[in-house]
Amino acid sequence: MLQVENLSCRNLAPVSFTVDAGESVAVTGASGAGKSLLLRSLADLDPNDGEIFLDGRARSAMPAPAWRRRVVYVPAESGWWADHVGPHFDDRDAAAGFLHRLQLPAECMEWPVARLSTGERQRLALVRAMVLAPTVMLLDEPTSGLDHETTLRVEGVLHERLTGAAAIIFVSHDKAQADRFGRRRLHIEDGVIEEVPTEPRRS
């Protein structure tokens, strides 16, 4: 599905890897190692070299907005350009089911953005991304502001995206989460990205 060939960007050495439909890949490394930079480069938001193919089609052959609708990047702190939540969603009906699953009330669409907690912002940003039904989701610490129970709930909803043939690449500082939700792991150290073995899953 996603084929990365010699991707390089500021402070990161060239790397090649593939991610198949339905796979989840954890990206780990120390703070400042370049985890967010990798995701932003995959989304073509930062200058980078190399080529990426999505279902056999080269990124360079697609308009940037079209690529970013299929390969969606969700930063740890998403941008909010309107004063209230609702205008950030083109399809509120599609969002409604996700809101319920992530324990967000329907009336949150009418809330001012300023009243949202960090965890509410993170969950709403995920809903905003899932409504687009992207082929690949690039998630930068998607549950860092959530308690353990809510984190597991989010992972459950994201797992459904995997069974629907989407792929997820996510950054996490939580080793347990990386082992639990990531079927594979890319580790960044000294600018080098390497795939490392994951912990065996308990049956």
Image (cartoon, rainbow, N blue to C red):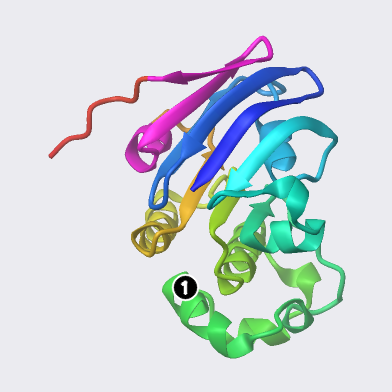
| Residue type, mark 1 in image | Gln
Residue 191 in sight here: yes
Q: Is residue 186 magenta?
A: yes
Residue 138 in percent (x, y) is at 60, 48
Residue 197, above or below 111: above
Q: Residue furthest left?
A: 203
Check the picture and name the quadrant holding the C terminus.
top left
* Side of 26 where 73 appears, left or right: right
Q: Position of residue 135 (x, y in %)?
A: 54, 59
* Foreground of the two, 192 or 20: 20
Q: Residue at x 29, y 25 (%)?
A: 199
Tell me if 81 is positioned left or right of 85 in this view. right
Q: How many marks?
A: 1
Residue at screen point 47% across, 82% down: 97
Res 145 seen here: no
Dot 1 alpha-carbon crowd within 10 angstroms: few under 14, some 14 to 19, many 20 or more = few
Residue wearing tag 1: 103
Residue 89, compared with residue 147, is above or below; it is below
Horizontally, residue 179 falls left or right of residue 193, namely left
Q: Quick check: is 203 in the magenta stretch?
A: no
Q: What is the secondary structure assignment of the residue under circle 1?
A: loop
First to last magenta residue range:
176-196
Residue at x 41%, y 49% (from the top left corner):
148
Which residue occupies the foreground of this view, 1 or 200?
A: 1
User: Which of the 4 quarters of the picture holds residue 184?
Assistant: top left
Residue 1 point in image, percent of width and height = 48, 48
Above or below, 16 against 40 in this view is: above
> Depth check: 75 or 21 in front?
21
Q: Residue at x 83, y 39 (%)?
A: 46
